[in-house]
Image (tube, coloured by chain):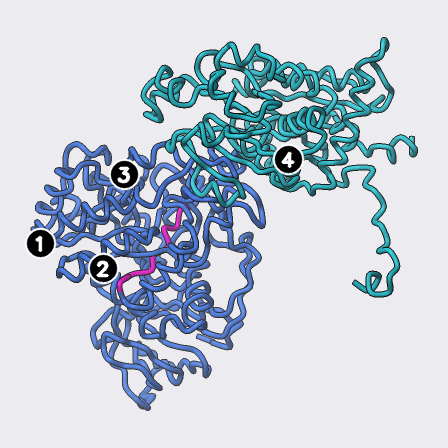
Chain colours: A cyan, B blue
Amino acid sequence: MTAQRTGTAAPQAPPLTALRRKDLLGIAELSPEEIVLILQTAEAMKEIGSRPIKKVPALRGKTVVNLFFEPSTRTRTSFEIAEKRLSADSLNIAIASSSVVKGETLADTALNLEAMHPDMIVLRHSSSGACHLLSRICRSAIVNAGDGTHEHPTQALLDAFTIRERKKRIAGLKVAIVGDLLHSRVLRSNIHLLTKLHADVWVCGPPTLIPTDITRFGVRATSVVEEAVEDADVIMLLRIQLERMQGAFFPSLREYFNVFGMTEERVRRARPDTIIMHPGPMNRGVEIASEVADGPFSVILDQVANGVAVRMAVLYLLAGGAEHEEAA
Amino acid sequence: MKKLLKGGRVVDPAGGIDGAFDVLIDGDRIDRVARDLPVDGADVVEIPSGLVVCPGFIDMHVHLREPGQEHKETVATGTSAAVAGGFTAVACMPNTDPINDDANVTSYILKKAKEAGLARVYPIGAVSRGSRGELLADIAELKGAGCVALSDDGRPVATALLMRRALEYASMFGMAIIDHCEDPSLKGDGVAHEGYQAAALGLRGIPGAAEAIMVERDVLLSEATSAPVHIAHMSARASLRAVRKGKEAATRVTCEVTPHHFTLTDEALASPIAYDTNVKMNPPLREIEDRDAMIEGLRDGSIDVIATDHAPHHYDEKKVEFDRAPFGIVGLETAVPLVFDRLVHPGVIRLSRLVELLSVNPARILRVPGGTLAPGSPADITIVAPDLRVRVDARAFRSRSKNTPFDGWELRGGVAATIVGGRPLFVNDRTGLRM
């Protein structure tokens, strides 16, 4: 205020160069500046992936454990490639080979890993808040690779990266997210990220699959898919899990597709330059018609490609970013 | 052996007493309460000014975990926590291992209580065998062994028909049915109140309606059978609405609320510690409108009892993922400070109402002695220190378990002494009281 009154420019805060936090637990606790820092860093990381020799020494000597308690191909592979491109020593622990089957608690598993001094633990777990538990008991940086139905922050970051790549901005875009909102960690992370960057977010699904008080997240909710996609700049589909029928959330996959499935006809209601996104794995013919998934508006494989760059950025920035490199 | 509690304020709503009185104890009984009683050879206990002498507090909803889960709590450690928390008696729920659906289990609990020699223990028997909700337990035998009420706590009385039969059958013994109201299909595998916080944290929700729908059922069945039903640990505003409706229709419905449900809301899921398993309880902490409704019910008299639902769990069991942790927190050693800090000092209730909620009404509903300082009553007395500064320290709890969300809280109001059958079993020397 004082600076404005005297007519001189307000002193600029120095631009962020690192994430000054131990862990990445979710998008909810990130500032817009931190999100933008990750997205900008990912642009540089993406360039590395286009080189003939796709490797930089940024995380040389760092040990990263990918601790996956849920099956995952895309996310685990993406993290692993990101770690290798940054020259980290990475190892994968999957549930089938872990000691959890012997009755060990998550806390004990984590503390045993900690005893071997890893620098980061990338955790995928079926319980919401599992990363928070580890964050409290571990010295290592915890990176959330999906916890229950809570958050999947790197997915939202790669989605935002993909949107920015195509649209050059996020603020003011109409983003329609359609599918199983209730059980989706991708939804929660995306809502936080997109609203922090001032997108106009619409969420859509049957009322049985819309979380309580969803509008308190700063989004608009509807069960009329045509309304959600009308003039949308971005359409993001969420996976419908087949077992949800058992919980009587909707009558049948066929009916779901008839009411909510993303068909070419529905896509025509969106802006002519709309993009179609899906975090995968897709159920063709349920939440998305194959013609749409494979069609000209689809950026689904771009999302996967960008996942590596975004995860490289997250790991790099958590390790201290440029400051760490200067010190080293 | 006579003991004279001299000075201080006495609050005994059952006797219409509130003011500066002396209390004369003869052995294990109250001799009389009057102004300026002569010493007449009695041991004199000077009550420092500011302290308040009340009929002993009764926590009608605790889990003592013995037999079967002694790593969490025993009758001895639980009753030790009780006297430290100002409770002269506790009623313990039957979900032990084995379930207290059998006179032998009741006798075992009472034997352990006698050995401990601390707070009085009133066992609550199971409504149904194994609390499975199918066949009635042997209620006459449970009554004969010492059970004072019936409950399948931890679960609701499963079907409307069984509830009806239980109400009818137990009424011939004058035993209340205490129901843990929760529609199992609506609760599902929920772990937190269904609201904004659970949605944000990705926790499966338990709607308030899961509780209220069964409170409505129980009120209707109580009306139909003219038998008393007591709603355990009420948490949802819709449940309170149902109870009020029942009371207006002169139904014999009573209800209790826990200190955590009139203190905390589901915002505690997110902060100060996100996913703290010490804020996981059933019923869950609900939203602010529900919490405020409970406070209003305490103010206007719709709620009869404050009970803790003291639910000890070992720290290993709580140091897990939120959805895998057991429900429940300990409550015996934090209840009185929370009642003062959250209800009395803000002016929600007066001291006489506090005594009704913690002593008079539990005794009346369970039909046990106590709740009064009338001549001839058991000399069960709680002396409270309304202005005592209390800092909750879980490590110092006498309970074997430390699972509390209130650790480190600074509260105003505490316990000065707990006297059971004329014996001072807990004296807080920070209050200046000597006995």
| Three-letter code, disc 2 | Arg
| Three-letter code, disc 1 | Ser
Q: Is residue A207 visible?
A: yes
| Three-letter code, disc 3 | Asp
| Callouts 3 and 2 in the same chain | yes
Instruction: Characterize the magenta stretch by its predominant secondary structure.
Output: loop
The earlier-in-sequence mark between 1 and 2 is 1
Disc number for residue B226: 1
| Callouts 2 and 4 in the same chain | no
Please name the residue shown 42% across and 49% down the image.
B285
Say which element carries label 3. loop
Label 2: chain letter: B
| Numbered range of the magenta stretch | B302-311
Whether A122 is drawn above or below B153: the answer is: above
**Front: mark 1 or 2:** 2
Disc number for residue A25: 4
Q: CA distance from mark 2 to mark 4?
A: 44 Å
| Callouts 3 and 4 in the same chain | no
Q: Is residue A7 left or right of residue B425?
A: right
Quickly name the residue at label 3: B183
